Image (cartoon, rainbow, N blue to C red):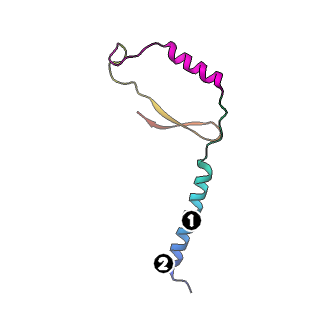
Amino acid sequence: MTSRPSLLALCLFLSCLGLSQSCLAEAKPPPARFDAGRAFHHVANLVAIGPRPSGSPGMDGPPEPYSVLTFDKAGKTSVYAKR
């Protein structure tokens, strides 16, 4: 007959094993297709803004608040943190 602490330890071990396996399976991001033209267009838009040296006008003052968003598998967003 198995003692109660041993049975609880076994249940905990199996639960953790199952959770770690499911977390590992979901942690892999889907392979992204790289589009060089889209990347170049994005960089061109950033460069078009011009130089932004530290201490120049517009760089002073308190930082603007922003939200950190998360996305679920369906693409729905939710606020993870506000800063």
As helix, strand or loop, the secondary structure at mark 2 comes to helix
Count of numbered marks? 2
Which quadrant is the N terminus positioned in?
bottom right
Q: Amino acid at mark 2?
A: Pro
Name the foreground residue: 48 vs 77. 48
**Residue sitting at 55 percent across and 83 percent down?**
2
38 up-or-down from 33: above or below: above
* Mark closest to the chain's N terminus, 2 or 1: 2
Q: Which residues are magenta?
A: 35-56
Is residue 55 covered in magenta?
A: yes
Name the foreground residue: 66 vs 57. 57
User: Left or right: 12 with respect to 65?
Assistant: right
73 up-or-down from 42: above or below: below
In terms of image quadrants, where is residue 40? Answer: top right
- Label ID, residue 15: 1
Q: Amino acid at mark 1?
A: Ser
Which quadrant is the C terminus positioned in?
top left
Place of residue 47 in the rendered image (x, y in percent of width and height, measured from the top left): 50, 16
Place of residue 70 in the rendered image (x, y in percent of width and height, measured from the top left): 54, 38
Where is mark 2, residue-wise?
A: 5
In the image as oriented, which residue stretches furthest toward the bottom? 1
